[in-house]
């Protein structure tokens, strides 16, 4: 299951803290809302609401906690003892085993996933930015048609083009290469849609006009002025595209055959399919799954700070 | 697709006005100096247009084109199979293919149950976190959003271990109560898959709805409170109607996502026999590809896409009628 991320709203939700900072939309959407209402809540309702929220977060976090605990258990003890508490601790031994298996195949998969995600999201963000910027700031033939196509593409089920891509790529001879994953990953209609909104709200026409009067050409204005003004928004677009590429399974499993080119998601599923026949230990898949989540969590938490402050400062303008 | 009507950076086109602009309308483009800057604009959009045409438009056209052919193999398999133009062959075959029809029905049932449950859960969570009584909002927001950072494949793997028929940690925890749940048995499999999807996407949908809740002007809520409305009434009669567009957005994305159900059942299928190779339409199309019957796979994915488009249209109609 995959859905394009309405990152604008997602970003805004994280950016707007309880103090009521505004989102990066065209108008400040949330005029400082008096939050004095906390005084009026009863102890009973506070306990009830917070209690329900605690239960739901147990649902969301328990499986991840189990994965963490299981990944630290020594081989052979993965399912032994309390499933939610540590025993036979050997996390580092497990990680060493994981990276040693088949001459470090897992490290290759991680590297591939990083390559696809960083290059794909990086180039994709730049392309989305220039396209969204052009749609927002220029009149040109086909502008409306392009916008309609971008909006429509967000709603088309991905499967429709993922399945035929394999055949098309084999005809042009790029099946089973890095390009086969990178080319489709770069294109993000949703990124264009977001970039258009962000360009319209964060790059004032006057700034562009002033730069033109100073004699700067359009390319210089875009790279030197506009792109910089859009940069907080670009982090949001990058982050969401990064996650989408890292998490993608159908496309790479479709267009790649070579073990050495697979990203970590496809590799793990390959391993998992071998567990039943006893060709690999379940234990290895669990550690692999655990390690595959770590970079994402790190990327999420570290970029979130940048992204949050970026949105907050962007909103002050 | 309309994309073909977009000229590439060709100076001859750069002079033209926006097609479809009313003749008498003041030329807004004037201010933006169309003659010189439009040419730059085309350079800015060119990389996207080219790539989009290559990896979105072309494959769709190719799939539709390919679905019109029938593969002919001779009985002994001595000569390579040939493709014969027979436009309706694959479509009528797919619509009589009981395994494919069953997969469509299964995903429909899945969507009808899972989407409302997940969105109801997401809405309730968003309202609770938004409510004045909630403490530790930041933590709860992050906790429910955390599964979004987990690749669907990894979350499916994780749950497949939790569901494991032999040594499920969940059953281990349930042991004191004497209950044993057969998560991947015939009865429960579809709902176990639904749980994996719900776990992964509730927080994501919650964040979208929550962002909309945060956008409600404070005065509206103040006014409702002054009128003596209880927090429940405010939530149900003021907040929910105001965030309706956000809920509809999450609903459409969820419907499209359900139709493409693949990763979760595919991963779980290696732990249980109750998920066959044609469990969902996408898995069915995938197994046609494995069987080297590409035209049939193409027809199956076209049917799926048309079905999703039809469902989205029906959904939009129903919801817009109710609001008017």
Image: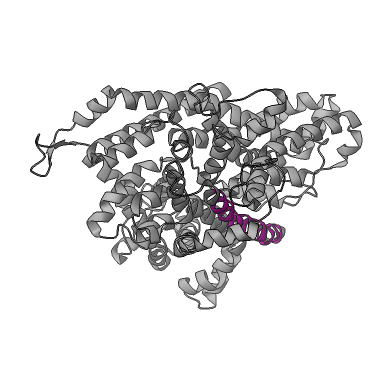
Q: Give the image quarter of residue B155.
A: top right
* On-image quarter of the C terminus of chain A: bottom right
Depicted B112 relative to depicted B143: above or below: above
Q: How far across and how far down the image is residue A133, in percent?
A: 50, 60
Depth order, front residue of B131/B304: B304
Comparing A197 with B179, the one in front is B179
User: Which residue is painted at 55% across and 60% down in the image?
Assistant: A97
A293 inside magenta stretch: yes
Q: Which residues are magenta?
A: A286-313
What's the residue at 43%, 30% (across, down)? B273
Horizontal side of B233 relative to B35 (left or right) equals right
- Residue at coordinates 47% horizontally, 33% vertically from top-left? B258
Please tell me which residue lies in front, B314 or A137.
B314
Q: Position of residue B144 (x, y in %)?
A: 67, 41
Q: Count the numbered circles shown.
A: 0
* Residue A291 drawn at (x, y percent): 58, 56
How far across and down, in percent of the image, does residue B74 sit?
Answer: 9, 36
Along the viewing direction, whichever of B59 and B17 lies nearer the viewer: B59
Which residue is situated farthest in the bottom direction here?
A215
Which residue sits at x=63%, y=30%? Answer: B171
B42 relative to A15, above or below: below
Above or below for A231 versus B268 = below
């Amino acid at each position: 299951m995959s859905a394009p991320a309405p990152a604008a709203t997602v970003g805004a939700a994280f950016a707007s803290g309880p103090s009521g900072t505004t989102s990066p939309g065209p108008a400040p959407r949330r005029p400082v809302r008096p939050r004095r209402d906390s005084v009026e809540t009863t102890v009973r309702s506070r306990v009830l609401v917070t209690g329900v929220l605690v239960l739901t977060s147990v649902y969301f976090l328990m499986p991840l906690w189990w994965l963490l605990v299981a990944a630290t258990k020594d081989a052979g003890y993965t399912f032994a003892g309390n499933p939610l508490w540590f025993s036979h601790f050997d996390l580092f031994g497990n990680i060493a085993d994981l990276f040693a298996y088949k001459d470090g195949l897992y490290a290759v998969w991680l590297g591939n996933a990083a390559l696809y995600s960083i290059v794909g999201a990086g180039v994709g963000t730049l392309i989305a930015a220039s396209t969204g910027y052009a749609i927002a700031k220029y009149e040109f033939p086909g502008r409306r048609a392009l916008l309609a196509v971008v909006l429509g593409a967000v709603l088309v089920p991905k499967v429709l083009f993922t399945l035929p891509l394999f055949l098309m790529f084999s005809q042009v001879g790029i099946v089973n290469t890095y390009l086969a994953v990178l080319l489709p990953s770069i294109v993000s209609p949703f990124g264009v849609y977001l970039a258009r909104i962000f360009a319209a709200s964060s790059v004032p026409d006057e700034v562009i006009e002033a730069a033109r009067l100073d004699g700067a050409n359009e390319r210089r204005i875009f790279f030197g002025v506009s792109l910089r003004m859009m940069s907080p928004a670009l982090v949001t677009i990058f982050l969401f595209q990064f996650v989408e590429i890292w998490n993608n399974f159908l496309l790479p499993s479709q267009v790649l055959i070579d073990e050495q080119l697979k990203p970590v998601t496809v590799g793990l599923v390959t391993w998992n399919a071998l567990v039943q026949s006893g060709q690999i230990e379940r234990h290895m898949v669990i550690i692999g799954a655990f390690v595959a989540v770590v970079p994402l969590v790190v990327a999420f938490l570290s970029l979130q700070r940048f992204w949050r402050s970026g949105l907050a400062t962007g909103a002050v303008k | 697709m309309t994309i073909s009507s977009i000229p590439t950076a060709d100076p001859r086109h750069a002079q033209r006005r926006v097609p479809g602009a009313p003749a008498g309308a003041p030329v807004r483009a004037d201010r933006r100096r169309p003659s010189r800057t439009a040419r730059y604009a085309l350079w800015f959009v060119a990389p996207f247009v080219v790539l989009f045409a290559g990896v979105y438009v072309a494959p769709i056209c190719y799939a539709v084109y390919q679905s019109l052919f029938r593969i002919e193999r001779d009985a002994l398999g001595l000569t390579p199979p040939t493709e014969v133009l027979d436009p309706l062959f694959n479509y009528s075959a797919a619509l009589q293919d009981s395994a494919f029809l069953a997969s469509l029905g299964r995903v429909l049932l899945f969507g009808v149950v899972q989407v409302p449950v997940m969105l109801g859960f997401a809405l309730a969570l968003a309202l609770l976190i938004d409510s004045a009584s909630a403490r530790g909002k930041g933590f709860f927001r992050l906790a429910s959003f955390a599964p979004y950072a987990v690749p669907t494949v990894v979350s499916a793997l994780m749950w497949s271990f939790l569901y494991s028929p032999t040594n499920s940690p969940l059953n281990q925890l349930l042991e004191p109560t004497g209950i044993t749940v057969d998560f991947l048995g015939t009865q429960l499999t579809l709902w176990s898959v639904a749980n994996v999807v719900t776990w992964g996407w509730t927080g994501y949908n919650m964040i979208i709805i929550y962002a909309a809740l945060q956008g409600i002007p404070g005065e509206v809520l103040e006014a409702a409170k002054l009128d003596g409305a209880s927090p429940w009434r405010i939530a149900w009669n003021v907040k929910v109607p105001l965030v309706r567009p956000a809920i509809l957005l999450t609903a459409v994305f969820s419907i499209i996502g359900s139709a493409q159900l693949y990763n979760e059942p595919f991963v779980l299928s290696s732990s249980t026999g109750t998920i066959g190779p044609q469990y969902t339409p996408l898995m069915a199309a995938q197994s046609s590809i494995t069987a080297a019957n590409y035209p049939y796979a193409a027809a199956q994915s076209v049917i799926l896409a048309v079905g999703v488009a039809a469902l989205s249209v029906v959904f939009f109609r129903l919801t817009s009628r109710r609001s008017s």
